[in-house]
Image: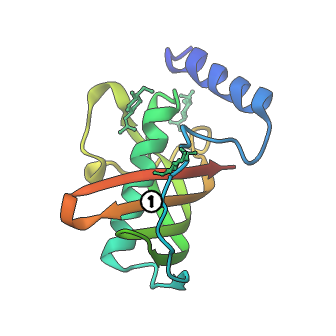
Amino acid sequence: MQPAWPLLCLCSLIWAITGDPSADFCSQSLNSSVNPGFPETIKPNDPGVLRAARHTVERFNNCTNDIFLFKESHVNKALVQIVKGVKYMLNVEISRTICKKSKHPRLDECDFQTNRTLQQTFGCYSEVWVIPWLHKFEVTVLHCH
Ligand SMILES: *[C@@H]1O[C@H](CO)[C@@H](O)[C@H](O)[C@H]1NC(C)=O
Ligand SMILES: *[C@@H]1O[C@H](CO)[C@@H](O)[C@H](O)[C@H]1NC(C)=O
Ligand SMILES: *[C@@H]1O[C@H](CO)[C@@H](O)[C@H](O)[C@H]1NC(C)=O
C-alpha cells in the first residue's frame, strides 16, 4: 500500500458526497458597480488567457486536498470582457501532475501523470478578474466537474 491511498480515497469520497457536478471552489462574488462591456471570444492561446488559466489551477490546487498538483492541460474556450480591468471566462481542462503539493514544486516543471490509476482530468469553468494597473487578480468563479 502506498501512503498516497488514504488521501486519494478521502478525496474521491468527498467528490462522491458533494457529487454536484457544479461544485464551487472558494467562489466569491465580485461586487462591481460599473457597466461591463460585452464578452467577446478571445484565442485560447492568448497570453492573458494562459495567465488566467494558471490562476485558475492555482486556486483549484489551493482549495482541494489532492496530494498532487493539477495543471491546466487545455483551454477549450475563452471569453474576455472589460470590467474595471479585464475579466476572463474560461472553459479549461485541468489534469493531475506527478508533482506533490507538499514539495512546493514549480508548476511549469510538473509533467502530467502517466500512471492510469492516478490520471484525472476535470473540466472547469472559471472567471478570473485582472486589474493590470494594480497587478491584482482574483478568481471569482470556479466550477469543476
Ligand atoms: C456592492 O457595492 C455597493 C456600493 O459599493 C453596495 O451598496 C452594495 O451593498 C454592495 N453589494 C454587496 C452584495 O456587497
Ligand atoms: C488558499 O486557501 C487559504 C485557506 O483556504 C486562503 O486563506 C488563501 O487565501 C488561499 N489563497 C489563494 C491564493 O487562493
Ligand atoms: C500507479 O499508481 C498506483 C497508486 O499509487 C500504484 O499502486 C501503481 O503501482 C502505479 N503503477 C505504475 C505502473 O506505476
Q: Position of residue 12 (x, y in %)?
A: 69, 29
The quarter holding residue 59 reads top left
Instruction: Residue at 58%, 40% (x, y): give it.
Output: 25
Q: Residue tagged by mark 1?
A: 128
The residue positioned 51% from the left and 74% from the top of the image is 35
In the figure, 65 relative to 113: above or below? above
- Give how far across and how far down residue 88 sits, in percent: 46, 69
Counting every numbered tag in the picture gives 1
Please state, as top left, top right, bottom left or bottom right, where the N terminus lies in the image.
Answer: top right
**Rendered image quadrant of residue 50:** bottom left
Image height check: is 91 above or below 119? below
Residue at 60 percent of width and 45 percent of height: 116
CB of residue at label 1: within 8 Å of ligand 2? no
Image location (x, y in percent) of residue 62 = 43, 34
Q: Position of residue 57 (x, y in %)?
A: 44, 49
How dense is the environment of label 1, judged by Cα within 10 Å: few (below 14), some, or many (20 and up)?
Answer: many
| Rendered image quadrant of residue 85 | bottom left
Amino acid at the residue labelled 1:
Val
Q: Residue at x 46, y 27 (%)?
A: 67
Q: How is the image coloured?
A: rainbow
Q: Is residue 1 left or right of residue 129?
A: right
In the image shown, does 64 or 130 lie closer to the viewer?
130
Q: Secondary structure at mark 1?
A: strand
84 above or below 110?
below
